[in-house]
Each structure stands twice: as structure tokens, then as C-alpha cells.
Amino acid sequence: MSDAARANALTTSYEVSALRMEIDKFIVPAVTLVIGLLLCFFMLFPLSSILQLSFFKDGQFGLANFTLANFQKYFTTSYTLNALWHSLYVSFATTIIVTIIIFFFAYAMTRTTIRGKPFFRNVIMMPLVAPSIVQALALIYLFGRNGLITAHLLQTGWNIYGATGIIVSEVLYCLPHAFVILYTTLSAVDIRLDEAAESLGASPFKVFTRITIPSAKYGIFSAAALTFNLTITDFGNPVVIGADYNVLATEIYSQVTNLYRFDLGATISIILLVPSLMAFMLNYYISRKTFAMISGAAQPVIPPSRPLKKIGYSLYCGLIAFCIILIFATVIIGSFVKIWPYDWSLTFGHYRFPSIGGYAAIWTSVWVSLIVGICGAFITLVAGYVMETRKPFFKQGLYLLAVMPAAIPGLVMGLGYILAFNKPYYIFYGTPWIIVINIVICNFTLGILSSISNLRNIDPSIEEASISLGGDTLRTFFKIIFPLSRVAFFQNFVYFFMRSMTTISAVVFLVSATVHLAAIEIIMLDNDGWTASANAMCTCIIVIVLFMLGILQVVAKKTGRGAEGSMAEV
Amino acid sequence: METTSKRLVLENVSKHFGSLVAVKDAHLVVEPGEFVCFLGPSGCGKTTLLRIITGFEQATSGSIIYDGRIINDVIPQKRQFGIVFQSYALFPNMTVSQNIAFGLKMRKMPPKLIEERVSAMLQLVGLTEWATHYPSQLSGGQQQRVALGRAIAIEPKVLLLDEPLSALDAKIRLRLRTVIKKLQEELGITMIYVTHDQEEALALADRVVIMRDGEFRQIGTPWEIYKEPKSSFIAEFVGTSNFMTGTRQNGKVKFGQLALTVSNMEAVPSEKVHLAIRPEKIEWVDVTIPAADCVPSNIVEVTAEVINFLGAVVRITFILEGEEMIVDLPEKEFERTSIQRRETMRLYFPPDAFHVYGEMFRKLI
């Protein structure tokens, strides 16, 4: 008997379970429905609560109650109206500065042969590991009323509070976000275009203005739109360094927290939502074009830059890196010295936190972030799988729901949560769970986009192979897709963890007398005059996030795939 | 023993993607144990048709019938059709054994039996010593063997192979081709094999289905297709052919200065006549010895432009009436002729070697 015949003699009739296949038919629609409902309930519902409170008298829905009184009040009060002009001014200024700075920085990273590129790339990403308050804290230590540089080295009375402070801190905060976009764009544009132009006799200046900039224009617009959106929605930096210079974000907070005017807070939220939504849609529209331009062509070797160009760009990048390092160094050193800038003796005193939260807040932040990381990474992977691979009936609608959170400022979402869920029957309200839900929803977009791009790297035949062998949805996902997405899952986990540790605006309305979070504690400490302790809290967050990133590197290396993409995904 | 009812029947299957017609009225009966190849250029709809059979695509109209039952609505999991993909599609997170066992586990086969079946499969595809390796540690040829073993393990009613050898190098492709043919013959599995490689199709299939623009253009044994290509497209696509376009004149075909005698010219009524002739059908004629039973008008004198040694045959390119053509001479005969480049030679086009067509397939190159 031949081998083949013997193999066939094993014949026994085992078939796939009919019941399991019947159940399987409902899995994808069920998962789609659950995710859709989650997004509706935890995103659209809070948003609608804000709309309701701002457009209807006493927040009572009904045709007769429709009113624009809140908006009228807003636009006729010069103090609140100023917040809008302030926000626009600060955001436009930041956008222009960041776009210019980061374009040349990304250019240096992709088109020149300067040394130390990995160092520069890591430094430019540093602001991501800290709450968007670290810049303001450091600037105050350096340029504030008692600043090391202003008051002591230069002995001037000038200080950085107000618009200048907000712009400088926002610039430093937005750099990594804009960098990721422009770096990707410039890496993708074929450098040989430049060479071809040069070989045809174009001057370097002409090549730059006629070839380099136009080829990266979508990336430039996209980076600008993102920067605008980040700046106008940021809360941490302006609340610390803005002083009397109110912006929309700080105005929402003070209306709600200090004046208990929820209706006006909701109204300003709507006003904030308009420009940020426009910037988001612009970005969304542009980034689709950017991706269409990116080719899979291999990157040719960059020709050696001229010495002068090399020195110039090295100095330029060095200066930017120095500024970012200075920010972090100031905060970290500031947390260890007795009295900045008078008494430089070292102390751990500031780490004995004087507030109620203290270390409990850090632990809450850590475990909340761990849960956010696991839930966020898992839900976005499942949602990405269902949408990308299984193409459910409601795919387009679900996709729209999934990208919406990125358009909604965290502060607005937070306010919406109070308005929507502050009812006794929502038992999760006032517990850390509402914070977990809020952070997962707020960061849903990036999570799902990176899940989808990872799933696109898996050969679709693998999925089909599983199905043809009798694999149902659940077992295909857990036995094949999930193991293959391990690294991407962990990257997403770290992303959610990092966002959860550092976010301020999303959760500032959701902390309570019993639930404290480390990032919010920074504001509280600073507000109460414990600036050094605020720095110490900041340092703790940075250390924890860096620790998690370190683990990611180890895991990624162990799994045999480069961790290159880990930061770029963020 | 297989019964004839275990046929796979495609009944007027069509598939539209919007306004694009990917498959048009496909009609085919695949007998149990038969090896059928879908052969056609890329974009001809052969892969779409295969995906309709597997259940990954739904036919717009028509029925897929297996064992007398319409299976259009049966989900792929329940069809129990094995699939072998061009990209192997092995599960990278599982060892060779685990890959092969996957389909059996999905069927809740007892572990003991799975173990036996897996080791039988490993033996079948000759990978016993690689059982605990991961796909990334295997060569492309070995990976495709695993994929074969994995698909056969579930005792597929039909095994569908989607260009399984395209990703492999030429040598391994030949070896694996033999493996597939042997498996098919020994196990008697019904196989449908999609390829754009005519050589592969002719070597493997019991029957070849030529597809173009979503339609079946010719169905037949490799022999029939090669001998009697139904259209100039098939004459060009399967094997190689020389083409000439002439006009009918006094029962002959006028091609430039030549008046060729062509058998069965009546098959095409049109004034314009397209002729195809295989390079190996053209005969070399010794200048010194007058040809005995030749039709003299079909002897031409040409110059050898390029001579390529292809091993067993020698391919000579020449220009006839402005058309570039080739003739294949067996290596032995070539030695006798001792033709050199730029030398003249006499060639004979046997009247019955021509295929006559009313239409001309537009050559792209």
C-alpha cells in the first residue's frame, strides 16, 4: 500500500459543527452592533447633551424651548468673546511656527546626512511622554516672574505669562505630532526628484521651492491642521501659563468649575467644536491624499550634504533638541531642588505630596491606564478586524463613528460626560470606570487606524485559509489574527497607556473628591502654589511612561520585529 | 469508489462587479477525480471563478452544484473544499504540524486521530523531519508542500489551487508540479487549478479551460487545445504560433508575394484569412535534394536572423514578407543543416499545418 493510499485510509467523517457555524453568522453583526452602540452611547449621547444644554432653554428639549440666548450672551460679553479671539490668535501663531520649524527639522532628518539623527528623532518625540503641562511648568521656572533666566540672569521684569507663554509652550508640545506627519511625507517623496531637478541645472534654492515643498504640500497642510487642532483644544498649558489671558478651553473650565454655568460651558464647547472640527476634517481630507502619494519604492541613499548645509542643519536641530531637553531638565531638576532658583540644594521633599491625592493619585492613574491600555488595544483590534476583514453591513457608518472621537476636544467630551451621565442610575459615574471609558473613547480613532493598518499587513489569504479549513470567526481571530497582531496590540496598549497617563483635558471634569489622577494633580498642586511638587508629579508620570516604553522596546525586539514603528504610530 | 454524482457543476455562472463583468456564463462539469486547469492571462476572471467555487465570492447569477446540490449559499467553512494559495498562506504562528492539524481541530477530531493524520500528511508531502519547524524556517517550496498537506488533511471534496507555483523559482516549480500531479493521481482528488502558465496547464491537467475576458473560450484536453486551438488568441496563448494575414485568391492564400496552399480553408468564409502555424511544424528543406511530395508554392527562401539554442530544439528567427517568424528545429536536424546566422535557408509550410481563423487576436507585443 502506498503512502498516499494509507493516508486516505484514515478517512473518517468529521465535519465542522453545524451549530457553531449557525452561531458564527451572528458574531460579526453582533460585534459591529456592540461597538456601534458603545460609540453612540459614550460619544454621541454626551455630545447631544451638550447641544441640548446650549441650544435649549434650561436644557429642556422641545421646539418651544429652542433658543440662541446662550450664544447671544457669549458673543455680547466681551470677556468671553475675547477667549475666542485669543484661541484663534494663539492657535494660528502656533500653527505657523510649528509648521515652519518642523518642516526644516523633518527635512534635516530625511534629506541631509547630518549625524545623530536617531538622537534627534528620539528627542523630538519626548513631549509625548509627559502631560501637556510640562512645557508651561518649565517655562515658568525659566521665564516666569521668578524665572531663572528672566529674573535672575537677565534681571528684567518681563515675564512669559499670557499669549507668549501659551504659544511657546504649545509649539514645544505640538512638535512631535507635526513631526510624525512631515517625516512620513518627506520619507515617502522620492528624493530622486530633487536629484533629477538638480541634474537639469536647477539651483538648490529652486529645487527646494519648486520640487521639495510642493511634493510635501499635503503633509505640510496636514501637519498644520493637526497642530491647530491640538493647540486650540489644549487645556493644560494655557491653564498654567495663560494667567489672565483666557482661551476657549480655559473658559469652559472656569465657567463650569468656578461659576457653575454649565449652560455657558456647553455653549463655549460648541464654539470650540467648530474650528477644531474644521481643522480635523481638513486634516482627514488631506491625509487621504497624502497616503495616495506614498509609494512603496525603496529609499535611495541620500547623497552627502554640502559641509555648510550639514553644519547649518546640525546647529538648527541641535537648538530644537536643546529646547526640548531644557524643558524636561528644568521640570525634573526643579522637582529635586529645595527652592528654585534660590536654594539649589537637593531634596526629596517635593515628593511628599501635600495634596489629598498624592501617591494614591499616581496608583489610580497607573491602574486606570493599564485597564485603558488593555481595553483600548483590544477593542480597537476587534473593531479593526471586524471592519477591515469581515466587511460588515454597517462598515461605513461604523468607520465614521470610529474616526469621530479625534475631532472632539477632550474637554468637550469630558463636559458631555458630566451632563449625560450625572444621574444616579449610571452607577459608573463618579468611579474610575467612567474615566476608563472616556479615555478609551477619546483615543479610539488613532487606536483603530493603527489596528487597521496593521491588519492590512496580514495576507488576506491567511484569513481565507482558516475559513476554508473550517475556521469560524472567533477561532480565526483568537488562534491566528490575534497572535499575528501581538506586537501591534502591545504598541496600541502602550499608546493608550501613555495617553491615559498624560491626558488632562479629557478627564479634568471627571475626577472627583474620591477619584484622583496624577495628571490632574499637577494642575491642583500648581494652582495651590506647590509648583515644585507639581514638577515632581510630572516627573513621576514621565518615569512611568518611559518605563512602559522601555518594556515595549524589549517585547518588540523579542518578538523579532523592529520597534521602529512604535513611536511613529503615536 | 466515487460515484458520478459527486460532480462539481458550474451552471451559467456569472459575476459582475458593478458594470464590470468578471465571469460570463461559465458552464462546466468537473468529473470526480478530474484535474481541470483554468488557463488565461491575468484579469481574465479565472481567480474570481475559483473564489466563487470556494464561496469567498457570490455569483451574480447561475448555480454551483456539488453532488447534485446547489451550494451557492453554503458558507466556505461547510463546503469542505481545500484551497492552496499562491502566497502559501500558512499560519506563521504555528508549526508545520499545527498548520496541518488546524482544519482537523476545527472539526473536533480526537487528538489521537489528528496525530495520525498529520504524520500521514507529513509523510505524503515529504516533510516529516520538519514537523516542529515554523513556516518562516522553510523554503518557499517546502511551505507550499505544507499548504498542500494542510488542504488535503481535511479530505477536501475538491481541491482548489490558485496559482500555487507562481511564487516559486523555475526548478522548484517543476519539481512541485510533479508532486501535485502524483498526489492527484494517487488520491484521486478532484482538482481545479488556476494558472496563467500554459506550460503548467498542459503538463498537469486532464482538461484545460481557456478563459479570456471572463468567458470560457475553449475546453479540451491539453492535446486538443494544442493541436486545434479554436481561435488565434488561443493559438498564440497556448504554445507559440507564427501569424500571417493574407487574402483569398484562386483557392490559395495570398500573403505578400507568396501564394500559399492551405488545407481546410473553407472553414473561414471571409475574404481576409488569418493563418497560424506552430514553429515546430515548419520544415527545413535541403537545398540540394528536391522536395518529393511538397507543394512547391509553400516553399520559401528566408534568411536566418537570430539563432537561439534552447537545448533540445534550436529556434531560428526569420523575416517573411515583413513579419517576424520563428521555426523550431530539433537539435539533431539543426546539426545536419549547419545553418549560420545571416545565411539563407529553405523552409516548407505544410498545407495541413495551418490553422485558419476569421479574426485576428491583437498581439500586445
Image: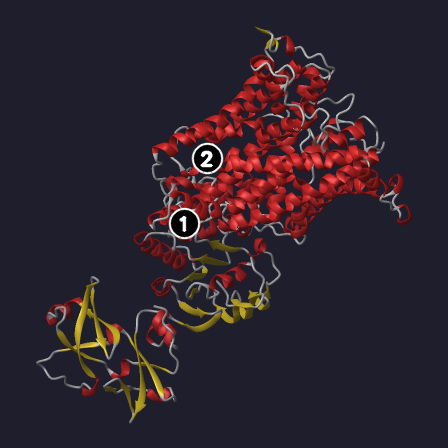
Is A153 left or right of A442, judged from the image as shown? left
Q: Which residue is mark 1?
A: B144
The chain that hosts pointer 1 is B
Say if residue A158 shows up in the picture. yes
- Decide which of B231, A364 is in the foreground and name it: A364
- Decide which of B45, B199 is in the foreground and name it: B45
How far apart in space, not on screen, are marks 1 and 2 (Cα)? 24 Å
Which residue: 25% across, 73% down? B325
Residue type at numbered disc 1: Gln
Q: Which residue is mark 2?
A: A561
Q: Quadrant of residue A305?
A: top left
Q: How busy is the neighbourhood of tag 2: few (under 14 within 10 Å), some, or many (20 plus)?
A: few
User: Which residue in the rendered view is the most extreme toward the bottom?
Assistant: B250
Q: Relative to B293, is A528 above or below?
A: above
Is B238 left or right of A102, judged from the image as shown? left
The chain that hosts pointer 2 is A
Is A39 left or right of A149, judged from the image as shown? right
Q: Relative to A66, is B237 above or below?
A: below
User: Which residue in the rendered view is the most extreme toward the right?
Assistant: A64
Return the x and y of residue B114 as percentages of the image width and height.
50, 43
Residue type at numbered disc 2: Arg
